[in-house]
């Protein structure tokens, strides 16, 4: 990532106060801090931005006299959740140095942990509502359990936009200006019309049908499971209808997210006009530093797109039974509540951070821009969308249902199954994962 970086120096007083607050309870707490993660994203932020962190090696560090141990388990085949579940189930009887102190969760399965006794209420760590007042509401809502108790905090928010190729916009739409492109994707009917124009010019509108899925799924009015029954929201069926039309007309493909075919559009010789995603997506997932990529020469730009939505995010949870509650609380404070650190993460790492004041300041900074986007500052667009995000319809079955639905619908899009047959495939797949559920009815596509 190549950002124009603001010069920030954390105040010595802040560093001193951090350790002063920790020292009071240091004698009563553990000397090993175990953090469970699936990749190095949060580790990099703690290493680079937490005052006083000393890196020992890739899986160990020091904070004062506390040893930090990073337990990294990839997400492949649900390995991370399985390992975390096993550790949390053993928490009560674990030796002090083996206890889970902090663990991370993603949006697709966050309720599994925050709506359980294994994640501590943030208030029990001494973190107050005033301290989290600048955090975006939807980010807090996602980490709030069914009793209204906040059980996790995040350093990032993930509002998303439409990311488009400047050269194709200029060729087909007459300009690469975000306002011009926005007019061409202002709603889904207009989006389809523009897809037709892109096809005439020899381009795909998106790399795959799955690209737009989260825009629709983030704007549903019901949950994947209602009263124990699998439910397919009307907005999900609108995605099915649009995607079938796009595949049939050659506007897109059925290439899966992260596949080689899907990723070809990141490069100059690709034929994909746009993707959908948040800051982490275009900064870290679109080959922006690779030779021959669109991003290396600032060939992408962003506009709002047909609807506001979010994608992803990572939350920090304090494990019930931790013997390092004071240190865990301070990490959560510094990495999610401290405006100076938030701004530093945004400028150095490219995250859209979970602090409204910090983001508003960067939105107004004319020197701030993203090299992948040709110097465009995307934060004003993110700010416009983030306040409209509503994730109140998430449930514990989101990840499993979403994965099964997209796989089943690809059979329909490719002409290998009727819609009814694809729904039955979806039901079968979900019931294998969650046998306690009742299958969904078969709705008619619009």
Image: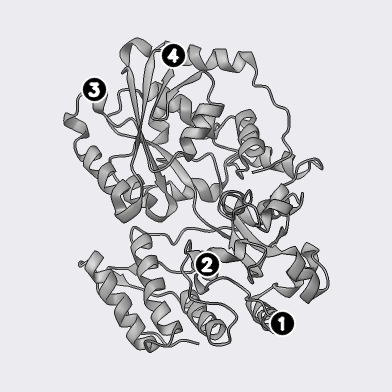
Which class describes the residues within 10 Å of circle 2: few (<14), some (14-19), or many (20+)? many
* Residue 126 location (% of width, % of height): 43, 26
Q: Secondary structure at mark 1?
A: helix
Say the numbered circle drawn on residue 197.
1
Q: Nearer the viewer, residue 221 or 244?
A: 244
**Mark nearer the viewer, 1 or 2:** 2
Q: CA distance from mark 1 to mark 2?
A: 21 Å
Say the numbered circle drawn on residue 81.
none
Mark positioned earlier in the residue sequence (2 or 4): 4
Say which residue label 2 marks. Answer: 262
**Mark nearer the viewer, 2 or 4:** 2
How many numbered discs, if any? 4
Which class describes the residues within 10 Å of circle 4: few (<14), some (14-19), or many (20+)? some
Say which residue label 4 marks. Answer: 64
On screen, residue 210 above or below 299:
below
On screen, residue 309 above or below 2:
below
Q: Is residue 150 left or right of residue 97?
A: right
On screen, residue 244 above or below 98:
below
Q: Secondary structure at mark 4?
A: loop
Say the numbered circle drawn on residue 96.
3
Q: Nearer the viewer, residue 160 or 139?
A: 160
Q: Is residue 148 visible?
A: no
Mark positioned earlier in the residue sequence (1 or 3): 3
Which class describes the residues within 10 Å of circle 1: few (<14), some (14-19), or many (20+)? some
Q: CA distance from mark 3 to mark 4?
A: 18 Å
Mark positioned earlier in the residue sequence (1 or 4): 4
Asked if marks 3 and 4 touch (Cβ < 8 Å), the reply is no
How does the figure colour the protein chain or chains? one colour
What residue is shown at x 34% (from left), y 81% (from top)? 423
Mark positioned earlier in the residue sequence (3 or 4): 4
Mark positioned earlier in the residue sequence (1 or 2): 1
């Amino acid at each position: 990532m190549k950002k124009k970086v603001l010069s920030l120096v954390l105040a010595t007083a802040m560093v001193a106060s951090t350790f002063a607050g920790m020292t009071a309870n240091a004698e009563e707490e553990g000397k090993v801090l175990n953090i469970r993660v699936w990749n190095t994203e949060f580790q990099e932020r703690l290493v680079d931005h937490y005052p006083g962190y000393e890196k020992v090696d890739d899986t160990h560090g020091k904070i004062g006299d506390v040893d930090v141990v990073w337990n990294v388990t990839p997400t492949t085949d649900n390995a991370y959740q399985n390992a975390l579940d096993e550790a949390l189930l053993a928490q009560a009887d674990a030796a002090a140095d083996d206890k889970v102190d902090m663990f991370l969760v993603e949006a697709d399965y966050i309720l599994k942990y925050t709506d359980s006794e294994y994640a501590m209420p943030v208030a029990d760590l001494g973190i107050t509502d005033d301290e989290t007042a600048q955090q975006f509401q939807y980010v807090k809502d996602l980490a709030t359990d069914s009793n209204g108790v906040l059980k996790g905090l995040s350093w990032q928010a993930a509002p998303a936009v439409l990311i488009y190729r400047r050269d194709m916009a200029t060729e087909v739409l007459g300009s690469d200006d975000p306002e011009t492109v926005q007019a061409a994707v202002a709603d889904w009917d207009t989006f389809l019309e523009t897809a037709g124009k892109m096809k005439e010019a020899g381009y795909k509108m998106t790399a795959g049908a799955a690209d737009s899925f989260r825009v629709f799924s983030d704007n549903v009015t019901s949950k994947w499971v209602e009263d124990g029954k699998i439910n397919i929201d009307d907005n999900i069926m609108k995605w099915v209808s649009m995607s079938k039309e796009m595949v049939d007309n050659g506007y897109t493909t059925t290439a899966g997210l992260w596949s080689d075919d899907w990723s070809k559009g990141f490069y100059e010789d690709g034929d994909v006009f746009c993707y959908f995603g948040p800051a982490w997506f275009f900064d870290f997932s679109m080959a922006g530093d690779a030779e021959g990529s669109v991003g290396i020469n600032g060939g992408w730009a962003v506009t709002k797109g047909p609807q506001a939505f979010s994608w992803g995010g990572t939350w920090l949870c304090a494990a019930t039974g931790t013997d390092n509650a004071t240190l865990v609380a301070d990490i959560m404070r510094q990495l999610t509540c401290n405006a100076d650190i938030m701004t530093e993460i945004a400028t150095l790492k490219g995250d859209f951070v979970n602090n409204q004041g910090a983001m508003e300041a960067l939105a107004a900074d004319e020197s701030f821009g993203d090299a992948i986007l040709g110097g465009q500052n995307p934060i004003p667009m993110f700010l416009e969308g983030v306040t409209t995000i509503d994730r109140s319809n998430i449930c514990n079955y989101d990840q499993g249902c979403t994965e099964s639905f997209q796989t089943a619908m690809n059979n329909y899009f490719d002409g290998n199954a009727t819609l009814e047959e694809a729904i039955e495939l979806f039901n079968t797949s979900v019931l294998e994962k969650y046998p306690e559920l009742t299958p969904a009815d078969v709705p008619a596509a619009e």
